Image: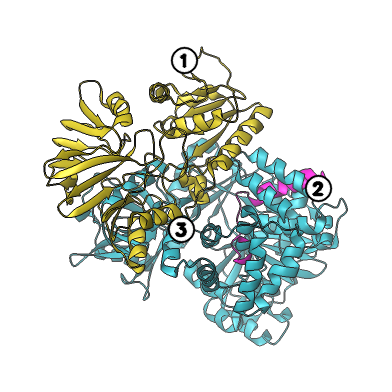
Amino acid sequence: MLIESPAGLFCPGGGFYIDPWGAVERAVITHAHGDHARFGSQAYLCADPSRTLLQRRFGPDVIVQSRPYGDPITIGDVQVSFHSAGHILGSAQIRIEGSDGVWVVAGDFKRAADPTCTPFEPLACDTFVTESTFGLPIYRWDPTNVVIGEILEWWDENRRNNRTSALFCYTIGKVQRILAELAAITDRRAFVHGMMLPMIDAYRDAGIRMLEVSSATEQPRGTKFAGELVLTPLSARGTPWMRRLGDHSDAFASGLMRVRGVRRQRAFDRGFVLSDHADWPALLQTITETGASRILATHGYAEPLAHHLRDHGYEAATLRTAWEGEPSGD
Amino acid sequence: MRRFALLYDAIDRTTSTNAKVAAMVDYFRTAPPEDAAWAVYFLTGRRLKRLVPYAAINDWVLAATGVESWLLGECYSVVGDGAETAALVLDQIPPAPSEDLALARWVEDRIMLLRELDPAAQQRRMMTWWRGLDRLQRFLLLKLVTGEFRVGVSQTLVVRALAQAAELPATTVAARLMGEWTPSADWFTSVLSHERTEDDKSRPYPFFLASPLEDGIATLGDPHDWLIEWKWDGIRAQLVKRGGVIHLWSRGEELITHRFPEIAAAATHLPDGIVLDGEVLAFRDDRPMPFSALQQRIGRQKQVAQLARTVPVVFMVYDILEDQGEDIRSLPQAERRERLELRIEEAVRLVPRQADTTAADDDEFTLTSQSASDASGADQTDMASVFGRTSGVLRTSPLVAPASWDELASLRAESRTRGVEGFMLKRRRSTYGVGRKRGDWWKWKIDPFTIDAVLIYAQPGSGRRASLLTDYTFGVWSEGELVPIAKAYSGLSNDEIAEMDRWIRRHTRERFGPVRHVEPVHVFELGFEAIARSTRHRSGIAVRFPRMLRWRKDKKPEEADTLEAVQRLLDGTRQA
């Protein structure tokens, strides 16, 4: 049904690529993160809630079409539908049904509840293409409310010490999730790096309730941020922009922070283990729920996950990816 | 243990030195002394001998979670730390918090008794404890059990915190932490005591360390303001003689008196109440032997006398820190040097000369001390013959007095032939400091050997570099093949490490467990301090302290050095 090609996963029956790495004619996109939705293809197809995000990333001139979740469309010899993946707003699993059965390409997904997107929908299939960003038994997430509680506690402590709380997180998905979770337990205002505003606005337009934010970038010179929470992309770290935050404690919100050595290598004061990817138990649970007999793993720890699955009676292999290394969406 | 876990967490959560010290001061002031003693023990990097083997921990994890050992191995290659890996995997067992037990009780009544148990009993004990602990304490427990506890504070910071807690000078506390001690309430109380304690007697002083000279030598001003010596490549040590008892301490604060009996014997001729700072060197035919020779002595605990015949050592003294029982570290360097020469001269005069050693060299700076007559124990005759072939076990490190920096620079070119590493420059009017304080002591080392080699294997680093591929193996060409020549993991900037990491992940040819065989593309200039023939390396060559000097993006792999070229470096040193 799907084959690996130099530009990524290709469906010959439908003549389209899924999350291609290069410029192709027709790209079917799981979600709006940069390592899945790359610029340059002639036409994009995604799930409805993902459309505004893609359009904001690519500009108004790029052709982006979308479909509602669960509404199949026939492309060539196959039937394609999008199903909620719970990763970020608009993220989708792509279900493809053809003469040789049902494939589901999960893209990135998580099972934990997230106020910024619809939950993961378990789908039955024959072949399941799973992500494996955190495909090792060391990755296991605490309940979200516990982690958000830790973030608020850290912010409070910094307020008492008159320091700024600089929280690094990704611009699409993570920052909105944190702001939405915080909105449930506090009504303080937060600051964000100016770069984050467009995507936060896009989420607000989609009806997501989040903390009120102001752009730290647009405050007048000399504004003091002591005691404030400032959310900022990692790319600002180590740049002169950070100076305006004054004396601050810095933290990174990512599943990567589960490993102490990773946090220390990057010298973050704190690491909050908050991920938009499935942890090890969630990966295994999901794979079981699909009933698939063949599993293809991609991203992160694909080899160990596939090996483990083979040991447990699955037919399992890895898919190549152009993006090895750090997950950009986490 | 909860209080200690919170201290660990407070230290671990900040990169601010002041915040770390404040957390420790608070702990030292409030914790029971028997717990604080253990805390100091662990914070200063001392460790319980590994109480249980790693294989046992793998078994516990498998039994408790079903995670197989290969998968645990994959996890380890990401985490880079055995105890943390196990703790993360065992995290799936839900905690059922129980009553807190003091750190000293944990260590003395539980952890240290583990080794007496059979593996099954160890496992039962550990798993019972495991359930009763929160995540942070679980991690600490595994760290303590495996003897791997580390935390981001230096000994200097621990000393600073203890000094603040006790309102004592840092130097007093630092001296009390030197050498060997057993953690106990009494010990901790004595560390904070304002009285001079009995144990203070055997202790060395904190070593003063030189900084590498990075700017031009001319920035040091007038050469006459400096005492200049050759830089020896041996073991930095302090020789302490108080109350007639002799202790030789390495810079790593290990007591090495018994490994070098000839030095201890020679020291019996020194006056009492003296502390000398110098270098233990393997020394023969009036020049230092390679460091690898000295390594044989370090490793040997038995039949030392026999080895001492082939690898004789000297103590090359360059400073005196205590004289007639008085701490003289605050005297100027030049004055201490005079005092040193005087004391050694007196000691030498006390020693009966032996016929076969009077032909000592005539170097005016090399004072000799023959001491075999006083060596005690069964080795006496052996020791005598050992001394017979050397020209003095206690020597003062010769001074070099160049008229100009240019003259010194040309002398420096002789370093390799003389078997030294360059020069030490010490400001004449400086006092003897603590730790590495820039400005008064500089080391001006000769440039290392360099070669261009190709990156062939990479594997993850450990600790804070665990998620990055930072440990590299390099090869040089031999008959059209790249032969491994050195492993290196330091010398790149964080940005370069990240760039390399990304490249390696996409250009891996094969994987052997955590080791990746990469496409031979990248050339690095490697520097190393010494080179020796080796039968244990495929290349036939072993290099010392290899490190990456530069990423030669301008070079193609075929332009890297050949094994032959590296062998020529080896031959060069042998002729010298």
The one nearer the camera, A64 or B332, is: A64
Q: In this view, does B479 lie to the left or right of B503?
A: left
Classify B262 as above or below A312: below
Q: Mark 3 lies on which chain?
A: A
Report the mark closest to the observer, 1 or 2.
1
Image quarter where the N terminus of chain B lies is: bottom right
The answer to which of marks 1 and 3 sits earlier in the sequence is: 3
Left or right of residue B388: residue B286: left
For disc 3, the marked residue is A137
Q: What residue type is labelled 1?
A: Glu
Label 2 Cα neighbours within 10 Å, binned few <14 / some 14-19 / many ≥20: few
Marks 1 and 3 sit apart, C-alpha to C-alpha, by 43 Å
Mark number displayed over residue B30: 2
Q: Please give the letter of the chain rendered in yellow.
A: A
Question: Is residue A29 shown above or below A258?
Answer: above
Tell me if mark 1 has few (under 14), some (14-19) or many (20+) residues whose alpha carbon lies within 10 angstroms of its own.
few
Residue named by callout 1: A218
- In what element is the residue under mark 3? loop
